[in-house]
Amino acid sequence: MNEEVFKAVTDTLNRGESAALVTIVRTEGSTPQRVGAKMLVYADGRTVGTIGGGCYENDAFWKARKSLETRRPLVARYELADDIAEESGLICGGQMDVYIEPLESSAHLYLVGAGHVAYHLSSAAAPVGFKVHVLDDREKFANVERFPDATTISVDDVPSWISTITFPSNASVVILTRGHRHDLDALRALAQRDLRYLGLIGSRAKVARLYATLQEESVPLDTLRKIHAPVGLDIGAVSPQEIAVSILAELIAVKYGKIANVAPLRWAPETEQLTTISADN
């Protein structure tokens, strides 16, 4: 049975999908399955393999679905002589620990804009497992000489290219274009796409202006809350290299569920604009 699970894991990762692997890691007393029994759970509810059936497997199934949302592993403990076992007809009298681990293929990172920050971010992100994709409308900047570690490099009109792409479920996008107009074009095309992470470089004043424009275009506030702007963790970064480090740190934190993929916003009556707020305000 585990061979079927192992094959499904390999196929899942090759397809770029996500799933949670449920494994019995400890048993005591009489249990319906041995240590090592596995079940693979997909976000859409499909499963491969079993850890013994019954209500406790159903409970582990829902915990696995939750772990795919949080991207955090967990251990669940089951007493097989309790009510959950009695409902299943599995009065085995044992105990069982189950390790639930979310799995996913390499995360995809799309850099919209190929300037100095994108150059350093690509160099740092590829070695830690991100598949980097670079997009710019200038071949002088978007080329293999500048981005040797990139999986793909595209030279195209930004909004047009975005309209043709289907992003993987674990895609992160960072907008790093050369100007306000290009940022707005990219943000308008990306704001309502289903992305793990969307970040925008720029000052708080610039971000507020872009948000106000999108609100005038009826982009929902909840959509704007999902944008990380100004992009990156607040570590006082100044140089392109430091800014790239701050962005990568935030990407990694979101990847492992260490920070929520929601940015706080508030309305500033004095300026009639949206602005981001820091966690300590």
Image: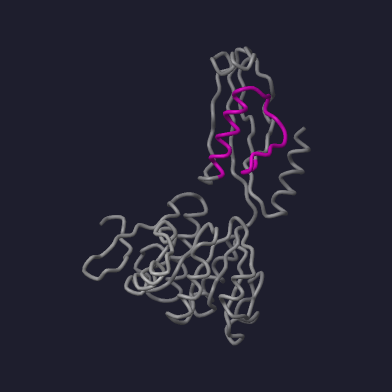
Which is nearer the eye, 126 or 177?
177
Q: Measured along the vertical axis of the image, is residue 27 above or below residue 147? A: above
State which quadrant residue 218 falls in. bottom left
At a point 45% along the width and 54% down the height, the residue shown is: 261
Q: Position of residue 98 (x, y in %)?
A: 59, 30
- What is the span of residues highlighted in magenta in the rendered image? 42-68
Residue 79, compared with residue 279, is above or below; it is above
Q: Measured along the vertical axis of the image, is residue 7 above or below residue 180?
A: above
Left or right side of 250 for 208: left
Q: Position of residue 68 (x, y in %)?
A: 56, 44
Q: Which quadrant is home to the C terminus?
A: bottom left
Q: Position of residue 155 (x, y in %)?
A: 63, 80
198 in the magenta segment? no
Q: Which residue shows up at 65% across the image and 18% down it?
A: 31
Q: Does residue 74 appear left or right of residue 262 in this picture?
A: right
Left or right of residue 107: residue 211: left
Q: Position of residue 256 (x, y in %)?
A: 51, 50
Instruction: Give the quarter of the figure containing the N terminus.
Output: top right
